[in-house]
Image (tube, rainbow, N blue to C red):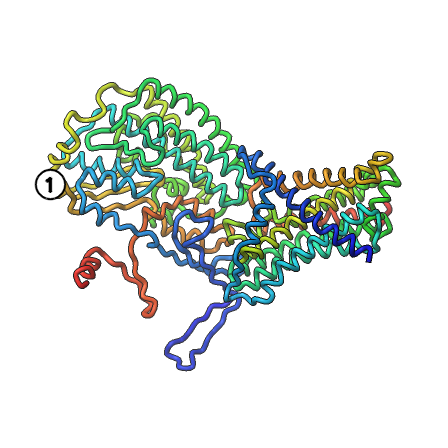
Amino acid sequence: MRMYMTNKSDDAKEIKVDYTRLRVPFGPVHPALKEPISFKVTVRKEEILDVDIRLGHVHRGIEALAENRNLVQTIYLVERICGICCHSHTTCFTQALEEIGGIKPSERALYLRTLIFELERMHSHLLLLGLIAYDVGFDTLFMFTWHVRESILDLFEEITGNRIHHAMNTIGGVRWDLTPHMIEKVNDSLKKIEKSVKYIHDVFQDKTVEKRLCKVGVLSYNEARELCIVGPSARGSGVSMDVRRDYPYAAYGELKNSFSVVLRDGADAYARTEVRIFELFESINLIRTILDELPNGSISMEESVLKLMRKIPEGETVSMVEAPRGELLYFVKTNGKEGLWRLKVRTPTLANILSLKLMLIGGEIADIPVTVASIDPCISCANRIAVVDKDKEETRVIDLEDLRRRGRKQ
Amino acid sequence: MNTIMILLLAFPVVFFLSLLFEGIDRKVHARMQKRIGPPIIQPFYDFIKLFNKERIVPVTASSGIFTAIPIIAAATSILGAAIPLASLIYKTDVGGDLILVLYLLAMSSVMVMVGGSSSGNPYGAIGFSRKMTMLIAYEVPMLISIVSVSLNCNSLAYYDVVSAQIMAKLLLAFTRPSMAVAAATFLLCIPAAADAVPLDISEAKTEIIHGSLVEYGGPYLALIKLAKAASNFALTLLAATLFFYLPALFDGYVSLGLGAVFLSLVIALIFWLLTITVPRTIFARLKIGQAFKFYWLIPLPLSILSMALSTLGL
């Protein structure tokens, strides 16, 4: 209940105390946040007056690491950027390499990439729906949603051998093929999953859930456009954008008739949740089409990956995919000697995180977890180094050059 | 002297029963969520484990209040449960114990709330203000419903209400419309008093990290958990015996002896499951404004209605 404001020029250090305000640290460790991010929230009773967002608790220096590895090693490295959308990262990266190297993967490989992509979207959305349910205190729905997600993870294990980091992509194709037996299994599971998703959709219409989500974290169409929000968060505010439709990649060009972009103009947490629920149905349809129309042929190049890697010349490109959380952008600059000059990753969370301030101010404390969850933040993707000098009260961002200079000094 | 002995004997019984009920509650909750759930004696394990842990008092806390409060909370709520249980077993009536029990139970809530605010944690402060609002929301209708019961039975003694039901061979909630309304009010207030989802606003885990309990750990937390379990047990026992004393419908041993106590406990457990476990499973947490509005729009008018009806003699 105290907030001290000190005036440094005054020798007597007059302390003004505003007892009506309370500064609540929200994170970096908090039950509602699964990853470290910190909000310094100023509240008066339940109302939020100001929010200060801080990132950088789990910066891992992946971009710098990538510059010290060869291209194939980097595929596995970028997969580790995020556990949930690992396939999006590898697809985006291999796509860039294939474009620089002029390699064209087979139709079947592209379809399989798309299949895993959509399964990943489903498991990511289910995970988020569960978390939203948990944040509003609806543990039963949380348990149920994650129970459904489990069956998708089982499918991943069946197809790729791994539940989370699938390691499906490689330069020029994919690493695992789909047998007719697996197709049957995926189809069977999809039937059950569709039924469960319908049930989840019904439960999200529950009065108490609606009360917690409607008119919470409102971000209008114009604000969403100005802040360049991406993915389901933007589509919840009525911004029609989807990389799958706008700049088709993998097999989305051929499949453009079997999915539609889900749009809602509620602009609140409920609209963003609803977009994700309906995208689950779109993904189910898309996977069914892929399984029906799966072309024949090989799944990867005849040459070994290492040979392909050596052939990739010096060049640069920008690659984009629609990750479950929104537009994921890679800038890749190869050095022609199996390595990279520069890798720049712009994850969807980095684009979305600024909108949180607008969404939170004016809301209630009870809305913080739901609002934060509704943009589906993936903090580990979004971390950048920022050094805060407590004495001088200044913040500056340290870049690689700075780090190198420091390294040389020692 | 005799009464004190009885109460002392009732303490371990309340301790055992309230933790057992909580274990059953957790098991049923888990089964409704398609989980296996913890063993029924898990609350006992938790209690023992927490009791063997280190005592931590934060530097910002005013340590005297902070450490005294778990003990007071546990003592008051166990006493609140022990008085009705003891008078049920020994069939004694103590004048005015109905009001005493309700204030003991409110006391344990207030104690936990004050403990949170004495911890010096901002989450504790938010928990304090939320609990304060909730207390105003549910304590008033709850008290009024009990007052209308005592108006109806012309007695403030707990066992008088029970024996009136035995005499009439009828459950109190079905005797008059005013009592049916009072029973409904009391049952509606139990989830808020128990701090269970959808009304666990004052200690919402994902919002304010258990609010008042945020700085408590080890033996202090064990005592507070025990206090909560005992107060839930007391509330459901009160609901089961004041309004629905089922043994009154039977003759002989079942209506009077230990069989009656056992039957009441079973009814109390059923009420626990209906008023605490089921809402916890099927609802999302409400916001403080929504909960306050609910309590002042439905239970409060209901309680006033029951009061008005019982003064009219209906």
Q: Residue furthest right?
A: B167
A83 left or right of A21 in image: left
Q: List the residue tagged with mark 1.
A: A336
Q: Position of residue B19 (x, y in %)?
A: 64, 45
Q: Quadrant of the C terminus of chain A?
A: bottom left
Q: Toward the viewer: A159 or B229?
A: B229
Three-letter amino acid code at disc 1?
Gly
Residue B152 at least partly seen: no
Q: Is residue B74 left or right of residue B246?
A: left
Name the residue: 61% across, 56% down. Answer: B131
Is A116 drawn above or below residue B287 in the view shown?
above
Furthest toward the bottom, the residue is A11
| Residue B192 visible | yes
Q: Residue at x 35, y 31 (%)?
A: A118
Is residue B110 positioned above or below B280 on the image? below
Q: Position of residue B137 (x, y in %)?
A: 66, 53
